[in-house]
Image: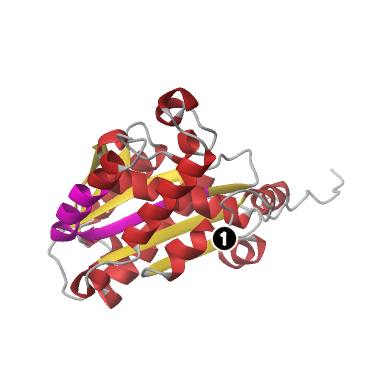
Amino acid sequence: MLKSYFDKSGQEDQELFTIGAVAASDDVWTDIDRDWNGILRANNPSASYMHMVEAIPLRGEFSPEKGWNDDHISGLINLLLSYLSMPPPQDRYKYCHFSCSLKMNDYRKLRAETYQLDSPADMIATACVRQMSTWYFEHYQGLDYEAHYYFDQGEPFEDIIKAKWDRAKLEGNPKYQWGHIAHIGSAPMRKTPGLQIADMIAWATNRHEVKIPQRFDNFIIGLRNLLPSFWTVIDEQQMRRHYKPLIYHPYENRQF
């Protein structure tokens, strides 16, 4: 079984909208779940989960009242990155990171030009599944029989991908990127290391791609280059290649 986890960063009204994902075989997840939770518990101060939007601003689980400061956060993030970057050799090709981002200013520009675009969430969700399928069929060492996709509870991408999956099944001849999927559902982020890793990928991608100097703006470099990874940033040029504007034909002046 292949298990894949998805999470988003950014919003449609911001500069960048991103989905991050991580996939690995079931046996690899058994080790990651145990080790990830062990690192969080053994840290001083300890944490019950990792969530970047809480950790960086020191709130919630990572508030100063619980003993956290910026140095503690940096130390924990580095521990988790070090763990992810050193998988056993036999597991390296059974684990992969993914991200797909959409430049929202480019998207809004083309919409204003009457380009007939899919929704931002639909666009990046589809691209991420395509990336994952490419890895699964062309790079994964030892093909599994089925894939299970998991999203954080209330994540809008779940409904989008599930609808495409259902449509492919109804067609009777599903495209390869949908045919291997056996289950799509949700899981609680605070209890699921895979969703916490996907959150780190999505958050770090947005932090890096907006090109604004800030803390951890190069964190994604380690996540991309120390482990097998696929990523893309959809921009104006790509959208112009794949979509067309609505061309208006005004009525000719006629005499009746």
* 185 sits to left or right of 81: left
Residue depicted at x 54% and y 34%: 57
- Name the image quarter holding the C terminus: top right
- Residue 29 appears at what percent x and percent y? 19, 54
Vertical placement of 102 versus 225: above or below?
above
Is 85 left, or right, of 59 in this rendering? left
Q: Vertical placement of 189 versus 95: above or below? A: above
| Front residue (pair 30, 48) | 48
Q: Which residue is drawn at 69% across and 52% down?
A: 212
The one nearer the camera, 191 or 184, is 191
Q: Where is residue 64 in the image (x, y as percent from the top left)?
A: 49, 27
Q: Is residue 135 left or right of residue 38?
A: right
Who is closer to the viewer here, 168 or 88? Answer: 88
Residue at x 24%, y 60% (from the top left corner): 24
* Position of the N terminus by quadrant: bottom left
**Which quadrant of the view contains residue 130?**
bottom left
Q: Residue 231: x, y in percent?
A: 47, 64
The residue beneath circle 1 is 234
In the depicted structure, whether residue 69 falls above or below residue 204:
above
User: Along the line of sight, which residue is nearer the eye, 235 or 46?
Assistant: 46
Q: Give the range drawn in magenta.
A: 18-36
Type of residue at label 1?
A: Ile
Check if residue 61 falls in the magenta segment.
no
